[in-house]
Image (cartoon, rainbow, N blue to C red):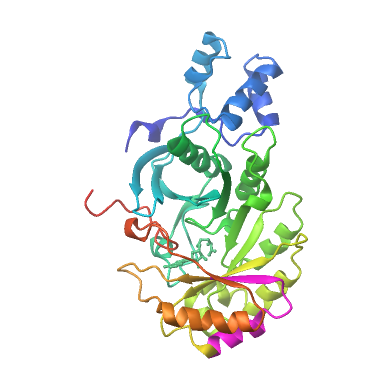
């Protein structure tokens, strides 16, 4: 393992303004120094004390001895022919996670991880194959956005478009609840990254009690539910978590989730050839979601050698979509992004490129 794995210096990224003030006070520094530090870390995305030239040199040296902005490092970057970039990131203990940058015409989307691995073992997802290694800290979650934006635009440069964040990388965000909520608050900070909660989407496989908790949060991300099956028999097979929280319980939680004026709940439906893609499946899905302000994202299944599924054909996906649309249920077909670099949904497993 590299030297960062043994670096015991405290990671400042992830601390709130209050926590940074406590840290600086304990070092005998004035509160305004903490504000400068906060501004450098979160607004200007500066990751080395050396570049914080508004701080005295002696203080910068002292900070260097005791702390780091983040332990997260870029291990490698893979660039797709469609402009998608996959980042393999190394955390302070040497564990690896992945984040994906997707440029779009009007905005960028950064897809981030919330856990190293995932315990849910969904049958069609690569991250499930690797199992859970550990939860990520709030600082590690936020570091992905800071590092990706710095890599793409340069440190301190304001991204020309807005940034959307989707928690659809590795891990189940609702099984790392406190750190995920803290990271949403840090994203939203008007003195920091300024990424509003409505620009952050949390995707869950259905940890029902945590959906009720989320509904009560003041700073609340948009919610997406990975559904992919409209009956318990099939969902039990694809999502082991469904044995614990049934579809009925999940849909009940969705019905009670508070929505903004024009907000809809997103339901992700991975299209699996011959498994969940018949006309009958589509009608069952319409019935299940009736009365919910919902939209459905149809996601062609992204393959991996370890996964026993194939994507439905585009023809089948279009026929499936037609039934949803005909019933007044808005649905969108998601174009796979970065498939050639294993950056697409469900392909993240912190693997090194085979050739590397
Ligand atoms: N644990 C969370 C977030 C990670 S998965 C969740 O389950 O929502 C992010 C999205 O990728 C989910 O909608 C999931 O259903 C989808 N996905 C997983 N594996 C996939 C695959 N092989 N192809 C396409 N989408 C996949």
Residue 119 against residue 164 in the figure, above or below: below
Image location (x, y in percent) of residue 295:
63, 70
Does residue 174 appear anywhere in the picture? no
Image location (x, y in percent) of residue 132:
46, 57
Which quarter of the figure is the N terminus placed in?
top left
Which of 52 and 12 lies nearest the eye of the viewer? 52
- In this picture, residue 190 sits left or right of residue 80: right
Which of 27 and 336 lies nearest the eye of the viewer? 336
Residue at 34 percent of width and 48 percent of height: 78
Residue at 49 percent of width and 39 percent of height: 149
**Extreme front residue here?**
105
- In this picture, residue 135 sits left or right of residue 35: left
Q: How many marks?
A: 0
**Extreme left residue here?**
355
Image location (x, y in percent) of residue 243:
56, 77
Question: Which range of residues does the magenta coloring cover?
Answer: 280-297
Residue 17 against residue 295 in the figure, above or below: above
Does residue 78 appear anywhere in the picture? yes
User: Can you tell which quarter of the image residue 347 is in?
Assistant: bottom left
On whether residue 296 falls in the magenta region, the answer is yes
Residue at 43 percent of width and 37 percent of height: 151
On whether residue 269 falls in the magenta region, the answer is no
- In this picture, residue 316 sits left or right of residue 182: left
Image location (x, y in percent) of residue 120:
50, 66
């Amino acid at each position: 393992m590299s030297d960062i794995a043994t670096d015991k210096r405290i990671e400042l990224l992830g601390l709130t303004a209050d926590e940074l003030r406590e840290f600086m006070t304990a070092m005998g520094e004035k509160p305004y120094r903490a504000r400068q530090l906060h501004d450098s870390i979160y607004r200007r995305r500066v990751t080395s004390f050396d570049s914080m030239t508004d701080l005295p040199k002696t203080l910068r040296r002292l900070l260097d001895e005791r702390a780091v902005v983040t332990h997260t490092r870029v291990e490698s970057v893979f660039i797709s022919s469609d402009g998608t970039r996959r980042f393999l990131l190394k955390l302070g203990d040497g564990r690896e996670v992945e984040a994906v940058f997707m440029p779009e015409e009007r905005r960028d989307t950064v897809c981030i991880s919330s856990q190293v691995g995932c315990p849910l073992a969904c049958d069609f997802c690569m991250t499930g194959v690797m199992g859970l290694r550990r939860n990520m800290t709030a600082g590690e979650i936020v570091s992905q956005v800071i590092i990706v934006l710095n890599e793409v635009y340069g440190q301190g440069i304001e991204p020309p478009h807005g940034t959307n964040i989707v928690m659809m990388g590795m891990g189940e965000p609702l099984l790392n609840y406190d750190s995920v909520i803290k990271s949403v608050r840090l994203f939203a900070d008007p003195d920091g990254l300024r990424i509003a909660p409505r620009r952050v989407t949390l995707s869950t496989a259905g940890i029902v009690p945590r959906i009720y908790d989320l509904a009560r949060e003041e700073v609340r991300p948009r919610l997406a539910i990975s559904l992919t099956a409209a009956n318990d028999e099939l969902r039990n097979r694809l999502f082991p978590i469904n044995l614990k929280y049934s579809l009925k319980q999940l849909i009940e939680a969705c019905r009670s989730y508070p929505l903004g004026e024009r907000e809809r709940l997103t339901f992700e439906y991975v299209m699996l050839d011959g498994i969940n893609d018949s006309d009958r499946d589509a009608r069952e899905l319409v019935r299940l979601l009736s009365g919910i302000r919902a939209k459905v994202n149809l996601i062609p299944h992204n393959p991996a050698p370890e996964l026993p599924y194939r994507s439905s054909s585009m023809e089948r996906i279009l026929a499936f979509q037609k039934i949803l649309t005909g019933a007044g249920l808005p649905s969108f077909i998601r174009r796979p992004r970065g498939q050639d670099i294993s950056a697409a949904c469900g392909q993240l497993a912190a693997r090194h490129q085979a050739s590397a």
